[in-house]
Image (cartoon, coloured by chain):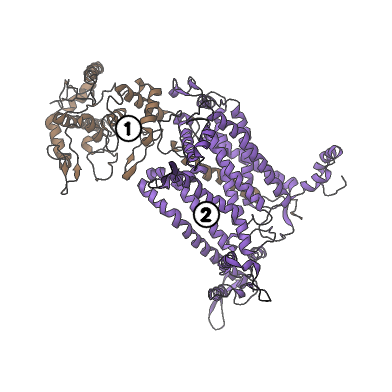
Chain colours: A purple, B brown
Amino acid sequence: MSDATAPKAVAGPLNFLDDRLGSTNFFQRNVKKVFPDHWSFMLGEIALYSFVILLLTGTFLTLWFHPSMEEVVYNGSYTKLKGVQMSEAYSSALHISFDVRGGLLMRQIHHWAAVLFMASILAHMLRVFFTGAYRKPRELNWLIGINMFILGMLEGLFGYSLPDDLLSGTGLRITQGVAESIPLVGTYIYMFLFGGEFPAGQYGDLIPRLYAIHILLIPGVILGLVTAHMMIMWHQKHTAMPSKNQSNEQVYGYPFYPVFMAKTGAYFLFTFGVLALLGAFAQINPIWLFGPYDPGAISSGSQPDWYMGVLEGALRLMPGQGTEWVIWGHTISLNVLIPATVPLGIVFGGAMAWPFIEQWVTGDKRRHDINDRPRNAPVRTAIGMAAVTFYGLLWLAGANDVLADKFHVSLFGTTWFFRFAIFIGPVVAYIVTKRICLGLQRKDAAVAGHGVEAGIIVMAPDGGFSERHEPAREDEMIKILSKEKARAEAPAVDANGIPAPSQKGPMGHLRSRLQRAMTFDDIPIEEHGEGHGEGHGHGDEKAVGSGSGKQLGH
Amino acid sequence: MIRPTSNDDKTRTGISVKRITAWRRRPWAGYAVVLAALAAIAGLYAGFSPKTDRAEAAGTADAQADLANGRQLFNQNCASCHGLNAEGTKDAKGKPIAPSLLGVGAASVDFQVSTGRMPAMNPGAQMPRKRPIPVFDTEIKTDYSEPEKREAAEKQKAQAEKNIHDLSGYIAQLGGGPSIPTADQVDPTKGDVALGGKLFRTNCAQCHNFTGQGGALTGGKYAPELSKSDVTPTQMYEAMLTGPQAMPVFNDSTLTPKDKQAVIAYLVQTREEPNAGGNGLGRIGPVSEGLVGWLVGVGLMVAAAMWITAKKPKKLKKLKNS
């Protein structure tokens, strides 16, 4: 190893590998890979490590679980169900819970890991969205991430359906309804998936099918996507928050070996620790309390796991009256089809399309390696918050009977509240968020233009009092000045009076209008300008309000 | 006549409560109670065995309720809404204020009064369970260390029990109806838990939730919690038998007394069963699990991430890497 900067502890193993694989260059280059430091960059790692724990605990569970719908009479050690007829799947899940050493702990860690896996993906996705980290060149990883979340939803649904308890059977019943609501092919899809009629299919095929999908197919696909996600991230390098020494060309942070490796290794142990704590002290999915599935039984407060809650909420809010049509002898169940597809279609379809919509509207096709502060992209942040509100309200609506019961409000009252709130809430969230962002930008502009309030009151010779302003700290200024000026609107005509291709036609007009809407209230932030900050910001708004957007570029 | 089967019935009429209390401490009291209970079971069993849709009054009372006292209590506490003859009342538009009590039976009175739902305080969508008014409060504290205080409390409790008994007897003699179940009928240790679970999931869980945590119903109504220990087996039985408020009636041909006992056994065993997996999170299913997953799970992980990224290695400097 001639490279003087290679850490000593790696040199030996690298030599060994290089002699056999000729891989020194690869390893040398990559162990020094630099990772930026910010707590929010760790959210995705929670998902990665939860996934590892899911694979490990899931493998443990497969050793005892019987994916079979064969009817058996329970005779295990949980006395309350002794002598009850149930499927072998349910009975073996009870066996894991009560008779396999460590089985209940593993089951609970597995389930908590699933909850945390999905939660951390969503949290990670929100971080990426609000900081603009999905922008070029990272759109592909953004799409992969969303697809992993959708696959995770299916994986979770099939997973918690396996024990064949009362709650999971209820979920499968809804799954059946959703499959059947698909026009034309719904019945075929339902029969194909279930292998016959609900609940078991003709030959009891349902649980074995879900099992194969749950332990083999979807985890395999997710594993492949995780690998792609990580490799693309490694290749493209991590984005970074605006800071000193950080530039679009260079990542500034700690090298993978030894610092980041130690940190991320510790973080894996933290993930494992938190999941073990939850698995040991917080009961999750107590299938023995739910009882075996029986198509004639149901419990109040039947909810799916949290990541399906938004679908549950949509289904609960959908009015049933007049939304089931019969056309040429075919039933079209819009009352199931709409809640099952439209809300999540809007959220995830919108999320997938957003990077490209944003590029199209702003015309910004540059590479971005430094993140935006959320306040500096008010429209994006506001749209994000509108989506969060929409999703969050539907999610809450999924628990409307629990809310009604625990907070002593009327059940129908909650339904009607949410029916309106899912339309009004996002609009309010958009307006409020955008105003907050602009307010924060004005504050930044004031700090950049006039400095920070020092808290020192000075008396002038003529007796007037004023507060001294001092320039902000360097790292603060770097953060504040990281805001890019709004891009000038592309001119409608070129020098020869020929309409610009991108502005032509109805789409071109739409594009210009959207761009104007996105940038008209931009607040310029400059360090030494006079009169910048609040006053100037207002001036710009007025100028643009009268129809001209040209002076926006400065 | 309807008669409940609590052990001090026999000596009730005309005998002061002090003497009842004294008698209860006699050496033979235990045997007398067992005998009385057996007699009562025999009597009630005779009342239940005919194939009637409703458990009709078992008219084998060997000790009568003090009807005069019952009537007086009714006039004082119930008649203002239910009418002087328990016929029910209506407002000016003909909308019922309070239902007729003719034929509701002793079981219904015992349920409503012992759970504190009646006498009602505020008319609403549903009468909540509350502490009964003092004359009917059988749940008062009696374990005082001072003998006088304890005696007074026991006396008050015995009087409350007698009052409920008298009131139930009074209503029952107005129009019959299901009687109060015997202690043996509601004994949770004698029920078939596995059967009870099946029946509970099919008939009860849809409103009361799979562990009896209760749930919301339409129109501001709700299915109350059954998981608290103050819901006695007798009250569970009476509720199934009489269908109070929003609850349907599960008469003896829908759920036989044995089935009812099985449901009681399931409920009592479920609420006494410790949570095998740690904290039960309210036993309401995935809603509280999701909340804990986000608040505790994601919360702890974010705290860990902040801590880890705040740690700066002493020797190594940050690098730039293009």
Q: Which residue is mark 2?
A: A387
Tell me the quarter of the image containing the N terminus of chain A.
top right
Q: Which residue is mark 1?
A: B231
Which label lies toward us, 1 or 2?
Answer: 2
**What secondary structure is marked by label 2?**
helix
Residue A160 higher or lower than B15, as above or below: below
User: Residue sitting at 82 percent across and 44 percent down?
Assistant: A8
Judging depth in this view, the residue of A420 and A276 nearest the camera is A420
**Within-10-Å neighbours for mark 2: few <14, some 14–19, many 20+:** many
Q: Residue furthest front?
A: A328
User: Residue sitting at 62 percent across and 72 percent down?
Assistant: A492
Q: Identity of the amino acid at label 1?
A: Val
Residue A153 higher or lower than A60, as above or below: below
- Which chain letter matches label 1? B
Check if mark 1's residue and mark 2's residue have beta carbons within 8 Å: no
Tell me the quarter of the image containing the C terminus of chain A.
bottom right
**Within-10-Å neighbours for mark 1: few <14, some 14–19, many 20+:** some
x and y, in percent, of residue B80 in the image: 15, 42
Q: Is residue A109 left or right of residue B88?
A: right
x and y, in percent, of residue A88 in the image: 52, 24
Judging depth in this view, the residue of B261 and B23 nearest the camera is B261
Write down the quadrant of residue B191 in the picture. top left
x and y, in percent, of residue A378 in the image: 56, 63
Q: Is residue A443 left or right of residue A323?
A: right
Q: Identity of the amino acid at label 2?
A: Ala
**What secondary structure is marked by label 1?**
loop
